Amino acid sequence: MRHLLGVEIYKLVKQSKTYYGLFAIFFIEFLVVLAAYYQGNDILDLLLVNLKDSFYFQGSLLNGNLIIYLLLNMLWFHLPLILMILVAGTLTSEFKDGTLQSVMLQPVAKWKFILSKYCVVILFTLLTVLLTAITCIAVAYIIFGQGDLVVYLGTLNFIESSMAQQKLIYAFVFGGVSMVFFAVVSLTLAVVLKEATKTWIVAALFLIVNNVLMKFELESYFYNYWFFPKLNNSWQLFFYTEVPMELIVQNALVLIGYTVIFMLIGMALFVKRDVG
């Protein structure tokens, strides 16, 4: 198993798609920072023109904490899309070029092979989120500094600078759980569909439908607290005045449960199906 993990890590590091994906993430960060640098103050002044006469704000509201929050809102849609494309390619490319058939001729258990892929995908996803968090925080604070955070979640919420930093870190942690879910779903889709183009289309559709359903409001306990589209947006709960930590922990555990289910489905299908 250790050898399989090493091989999968090596293949992921060697493929150029990995670096194109990382570059795409950093480019999104660059665009958001650039837009905020040139137009951020105008947008904030328009939104808060009446409030600045009534409230005292510590430092500039266009600060690193706000930029990181804006980046989170952008990245938690674009990052899973990039990850799903990269992850699917780790398996579909092997179906296409016949590498998988060659591997299966070796004395390798199919369940160990696919489990090693899931493990490497999860590790890669978490490292990508960590790298994204480090670059977002570093760039935002270096260029814009620190200050109080203002967010709109039904009403305007004002968060003191040091507290905002903690909330943003927690948001990245929960985002890591969410990104792992999407990555595992993508690999499972690759097991089912085998072809890269089909897998990318279905993965993108899965992500889009997930984001559409996340916006729906239904009078259903299961839909609001147990259905995975609603769970993936739980990172926003950290930015309420009263943070519902029990609900956040519950949502994270349920999302991890969905991740394990999709992984087990993918492993079972891979073991039973012909890889040719």
Image (cartoon, helix red, strand yellow):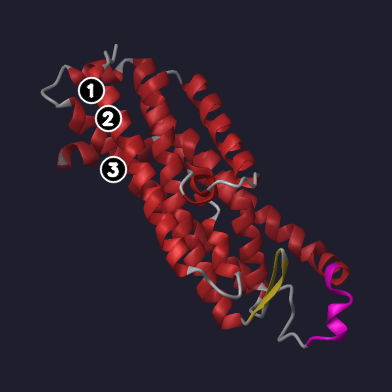
Label 2 residue SS? helix
- Residue for point 72% across, 63% down: 154
Q: Residues within 10 Å of mark 2 (few under 14, many from 20)?
A: many
- Residue identified by numbered label 2: 267
Above or below, 72 against 184 in this view is: below
* Distance (Cα) linking label 2 and label 3: 12 Å
Amino acid type assigned to the residue bearing label 2 in the image = Met
Q: Residues within 10 Å of mark 3 (few under 14, many from 20)?
A: some
Q: Position of residue 268 (x, y in %)?
A: 26, 26
Q: Is residue 224 magenta?
A: no
* Distance (Cα) linking label 2 and label 1: 6 Å
Whether residue 141 appears in this view of the structure is: yes
Quadrant in the picture for the N terminus: top left
Q: Which mark is residue 119?
A: 3
Label 3 residue SS? helix
Q: Is residue 51 magenta?
A: yes
Q: Position of residue 61 (x, y in %)?
A: 74, 76
* Distance (Cα) linking label 1 and label 3: 16 Å
- Residue for point 46% across, 41% down: 182
Q: Position of residue 128 (x, y in %)?
A: 44, 51
Whether residue 93 appears in this view of the structure is: no
Residue 9 occupies quadrant: top left
Amino acid type assigned to the residue bearing label 1 in the image = Val
Q: Which mark is residue 164?
A: none
* Image-based side of 7 in relation to 234, left or right: left
Q: Which stretch is magenta?
A: 47-55
Above or below, 138 against 31 in this view is: below
* Image-based side of 41 in relation to 151, left or right: right
| Disc nearer the start of the sequence (1/3) | 3
The answer to whether the residue labelled 2 contacts the one labelled 1, judged by CB atoms less than 8 Å apart, is yes
